[in-house]
Image (cartoon, helix red, strand yellow):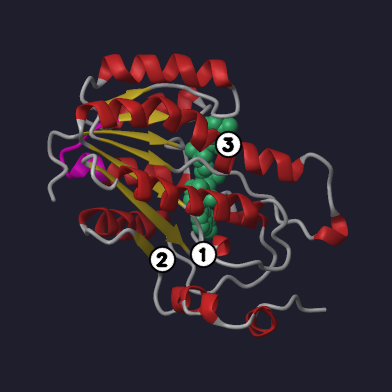
Amino acid sequence: MSFAGKTYWIIGASEGLGRALARALAHEGARLILSARNEPRLRDLSRDLPEATALAMDVTDATSVVAAACRAEKLGPSLDGVIYCAGSYDPMSALEWKPGRAERMTEVNYTGALRVLSHVVPRMVARRSGHVVLIGSLAGHRGLPGAIGYGASKAALMHLAENLRADLKSTGVRVQSVNPGFIRTRLTEKNSFVMPMLMTPEHAAAHVIHAMRRRRFSTSFPAPFAWLFTLGRHLPLPWFQAIFRPRA
Ligand SMILES: NC(=O)c1ccc[n+]([C@@H]2O[C@H](COP(=O)([O-])OP(=O)(O)OC[C@H]3O[C@@H](n4cnc5c(N)ncnc54)[C@H](OP(=O)(O)O)[C@@H]3O)[C@@H](O)[C@H]2O)c1
């Protein structure tokens, strides 16, 4: 699969994985629409890339999403793909529940995706072509400690990808769920624990692009760390949670 000349809308492109994905896809010859809240960071990136447009959007604000979706349609009348990479993460245990934080993560990680896709998917279906890529997380496979809000929002996004796949199977719209392990970004700066197989954003972006080229619906990486989560789905929950129990 070639990305040359295709138009992709990356949501969450100002930082981290989304920013690295923008650079990598631009290198492959893709035209890009770059969204997130921080417009100066998007402009700074778009200036560096041959065919990229900054389009500021807050996925938690329905009005902002509608305005951006209308503009994106004008910028790329045949939007070939959308990558939903916006993310919010606050490590939080149920024993130290901070009001509002779990709702915030759900708004960005899951409800924001519904807002964006509700505009993008119908157009793709009408055109009978398109590519939807949802960036989940290994943390979305099963319930982990210290992941109130984040884990469930990622599980919801990954579940949504399955719903979309089922409904869109014969429409020409391809759906993929791509689920990374730990990436060194501002998001994981908050973690105080050891992060196995920590990747650079560039390394993770290369994994995502590799997954996008393949027909496989769901990709979790990096192996072998990801196997703990994909195979771990079939373990009895107490066994799985014993592997990841919080240290005292
Ligand atoms: N880092 C990891 O270890 C890891 C592991 C698995 C999965 N992931 C997933 O990978 C994706 C990228 O994460 P990252 O590590 O690259 O984090 P990051 O560096 O913090 O980037 C997150 C991106 O989401 C955007 N964003 C946040 N809130 C937004 C909002 N309300 N509206 C629009 N955009 C918003 C941010 O831009 P603005 O602040 O400019 O809005 C930024 O571009 C996320 O979905 C994350 O859950 C990350």
Q: Is residue 244 shown to the viewer in this render? A: yes
Where is residue 53? Give x, y as percent: 31, 23
How many tags in the picture? 3
SS under mark 3: helix
Where is residue 209? Give x, y as percent: 27, 53
Residue at the spot of label 2 = 220
Residue at the spot of label 1 = 138
> Along the polypeptide, which appears first: circle 3 or circle 1?
3
The magenta region covers 25-32
The residue shown at (20%, 33%) is 128
- The reply to whether dot 3 and dot 1 touch (C-beta < 8 Å) is no
Is-magenta flag for residue 94? no
Q: Is residue 185 shown to the viewer in this render? A: no
SS under mark 1: helix
> Along the polypeptide, which appears first: circle 1 or circle 2?
1
Distance from Cα at disc 3 to Cα at disc 1: 19 Å
125 displayed left or right of 108? left
Ligand 1 neighbours mark 3 (CB distance < 8 Å) = no
The quadrant where residue 112 appears = top right
Rendered position, 40 above or below 159 = above
Q: Amino acid at mark 2?
A: Ser
- The reply to whether dot 1 and dot 2 touch (C-beta < 8 Å) is yes
Q: Amino acid at mark 1?
A: Leu
Ligand 1 neighbours mark 1 (CB distance < 8 Å) = yes
- The reply to whether dot 3 and dot 2 touch (C-beta < 8 Å) is no
Residue at the spot of label 3 = 111
Distance from Cα at disc 3 to Cα at disc 2: 22 Å
Where is residue 34? Give x, y as percent: 37, 30
Distance from Cα at disc 1 to Cα at disc 2: 7 Å
Q: Amino acid at mark 3?
A: Thr
Where is residue 3? Give x, y as percent: 16, 43
The residue shown at (70%, 65%) is 192
